[in-house]
Amino acid sequence: MYEFENIVGNKNIINSLVKANENDTVYHSYILDGKEKTGKQLIAKTFAKLLLCENNKTTPCLKCSSCISFDNGNNPDFFFVDNNKKSLGVSDVRDNIIKNIETKPFKYKYKVFVIKDAHNMTIQAQNAILKTIEEPPKFAIFILLSKNYNSFLPTILSRCILFKIKPLSSNIIEKFLLSKGISSSMSTFYATYSRGSIGRALDIAYSEEFINFRQNIINDIEKLNSLDLIQMYKLINKYENIKENINDILDIYLLVYRDSLILKKTNNVEKVIQKDVINIIKDISNMSTKNLINKIDALLKAKLYLEQNSNFNMTIETLFLKLKEK
Ligand SMILES: [Zn+2]
């Protein structure tokens, strides 16, 4: 069920959306921009539900026919555009949006369109939707969800209110996981891997696949020092084949070295996040402080370079040469 209280963080954005509805100053187009699984869809849908609610202005009443049909996925005035393709073309915009905007709402005050992955709209599609956004009928509200607002035409951007959704702090995620009944040590652990995303934290917490994957990578870390160059290139090859997970892989490395450094500096096992692999952490903590810091530094840099689309192989090769330094 879509309720504001189920949304963690992002209170400023929610407050301004709710205020707009309360004061009847809802704008016709919004962009919610943020990384994967940061709650864009949840915020957009909850706001849409509020806009369509027949009773309340600040939080969906959950009782009216609109709220009920919304949760059942058949509210006639709510349109969720998700074409599951790499790009959103003119025909997608025409069939899902422009055609539906020609008629008044079926039952409620607005027609609300939430467009998933709107950054994937082709230039032609953006131009097609632009005309609608420029002179929208009073009842039309657009919420564009995007992972990269820079891919919008300036003409689109200038006609939308842009909200940037920021990753949450790991403290907030930890508290959320605790409230879901996950143990304190595991909450810290998952929050560290979540990259500021509740959705990701939950995915990990309930995924056996991730636990196995992590174990596999930790085994690699354990062996790293004893690898010769040929074996090291084999390892790089392995990671290249699962490139899409490289952020996870580097996070797992980071956390192992981070834990080892903490253990070395504090000699306190309680401060270690990954107590389940304490023997490996203890082993690695025998390295010099400088060496551990250098490895962490190299990992952070590699993450940054990859984010900036640097050459994958070169970045990873340089990284592993540094990780193998004694
Ligand atoms: Zn309602």
Image: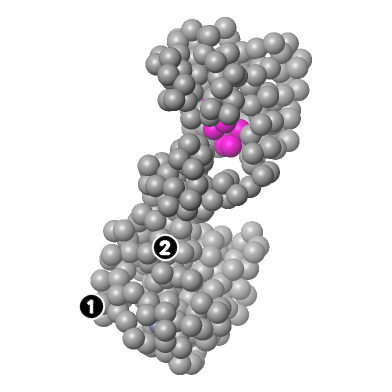
Give, as a three-letter code, the residue at label 1: Asn
Q: Name the residue under label 1.
A: 23
| 313 or 288, nearer to the observer | 288
Circle 2/circle 1 CB separation < 8 Å: no
| 223 or 13, nearer to the observer | 223
In x, y percent, where is residue 60?
37, 77
Q: Name the residue under label 2.
A: 6
Q: Is mark 2 on a helix, strand or loop?
A: helix
Crowd around label 1: few <14 · some 14–19 · many ≥20 (10 Å)? few
Give, as a three-letter code, the residue at label 2: Asn
Q: Which residue is drawn at 54% across and 32% down?
A: 251
Assess mark 2: CB under 8 A from ligand 1?
no
* Residue 35: mark: none
Q: Which residue is drawn at 59% across and 25% down?
A: 277
The mark lying in front, picked from 2 and 1, is 2
Q: What element carries label 1?
A: loop
User: Does residue 274 appear left or right of residue 54 in this picture?
Assistant: right
Q: Residue at x 45, y 10 (%)?
A: 289
What secondary structure is the magenta-colored segment mainly? helix
Task: Determine if residue 9 is in view.
Answer: yes
Determine which quarter of the picture holds residue 31.
Answer: bottom left
Q: Give the range drawn in magenta.
A: 247-254
